[in-house]
Image (spheres, rainbow, N blue to C red):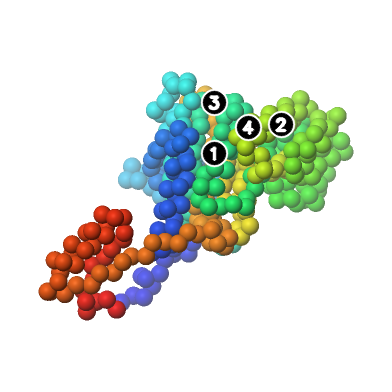
Amino acid sequence: MNRQLLHTPEGVRDIYGKEYARKLETEEHIRRQFNLYGYQDIQTPTFEFFDVFSREIGTTPSKELYKFFDKEGNTLVLRPDFTPSMARCAAKYFMDENVPIRFCYAGNTFTNTSSLQGKLKEVTQMGAELMNDGSVEADGEMIAMAVEALKETGLKDFQVSIGQVEYFKGICAQAGITDETELELREFISGKNIFGAEELLVQKGISEKYKDLILKTSDYFGTVEVLELAKSPDLNERSLNAIMRLEKLYHVLCGYGVEKYISFDLGMLSKYNYYTGVIFKVYTYGVGDAIAKGGRYDRLLGYFGKDAPAIGFVVVIDDLLLALERQQHIPDQQEICMITYNGDNYESRLAEVKGLRQKGIKAALIPENRKE
């Protein structure tokens, strides 16, 4: 026998037994919370046409996609991200709808990256999307629901860090920075690489006033008070409106009673270029990356022919489970009751396990000579 057949490829793994039971239970807690907020379950294909995740849409880079061809020669990809699929689906089935549309979903995403750094290439995500609603109240609902869903799983210590893409974009536009340079800056700023950002700005000949505005974005993080500090006299109207929107959002979140979980970070920028407004990430100890992330993408549906605002987020289930385990918030799983039988007592033992199952107790029938 070829022993190599027993192993999985790099970046994927088997999940079974108690670990998988915990995963299913965690997913059920989250789904229940989504449904309580009025979100309806939807399932989209595991693979889509390549154009759904194209560079123009601003999703995962082509080199990180799992690509293959169908028999007609069309390029297909395993989904690396749910949001473009949700946008396509909304445009296809709800083109003429103007009332708010609420989706929630669960499934696996696939990213073909060579720098794993402990990450899997296949991860399970659960998320929600609210479309046809561009209000700050919709932003608040989405973030509050994320908080409540995570609390429902047993997670206690976490923080939602909120940013605003328009704040950064407004300053870049004010400084006359091109889209290409903005993307380079975004990578430096989000990675807190201030020296790299400063060097790029000097190379591009950006004036000292605008250079300082851009570099200071990474300094504005913390409680709601940082929003007032970010209101520089040199700030443009677009960026100022972004700050004012965050202040309104905080007021909405206070109404939900989740303000203790909230902080702000104007230097937080996403690798996904389709985000247009508020973005947020959820952090907790025991995990090196965000366990949930999302934001507003008001122009994405337009690529599929439907001009509508939208906001959404995903919970990375694998990272959430790791955090719960390291924080010792994993509930004890019900043990399986093993009932042995032989040829003489099979019927009575069968009746016994049927009675246990009716009471909600897990029970398995085991031949006496197979118990060990």
Tag of residue 11? none
Name the residue carrying label 3.
Answer: 133
Q: Amino acid at mark 2?
A: Glu
The crowding category of the residue bearing disc 1, from other C-alpha atoms within 10 Å (few below 14, some 14 to 19, many at least 20), is many
SS category of the residue bearing label 3: loop
In the image, which disc is placed on residue 247?
Answer: 2
Kind of residue sitting beneath label 1: Met
Label 4 Cα crowd, 10 Å radius (few <14 / some 14-19 / many 20+): few
Identify the residue under disc 1.
Answer: 145
Corner quadrant of residue 119: bottom right
Asked whether disc 1 touches disc 2, contact meaning CB atoms under 8 Å apart, the reply is no
Tell me which corner region of the image, top left, top right, bottom left or bottom right, holds residue 266: top right
Residue at (45%, 62%) from the top-left corner?
Answer: 332
Cα gap from disc 4 to disc 3, whole angstroms: 19 Å
Which mark sits nearer the N-terminus, 4 or 3?
A: 3
Could you tell which of marks 4 and 1 lies nearer the N-terminus? 1
Q: Residue at x 74, y 38 (%)?
A: 224
Residue 13 left/right relative to 276: left
Secondary structure under badge 4? Answer: helix
Q: Could you tell me residue 251's position as x and y percent?
A: 68, 31
Disc nearer the start of the sequence (2/4): 2
Q: Name the front one of labels 2 and 4.
A: 4
**Residue at which label 4 appears:** 255
Q: Work out how far the residue at label 1 is from the one at label 2, CA to CA, in angstroms.
A: 19 Å
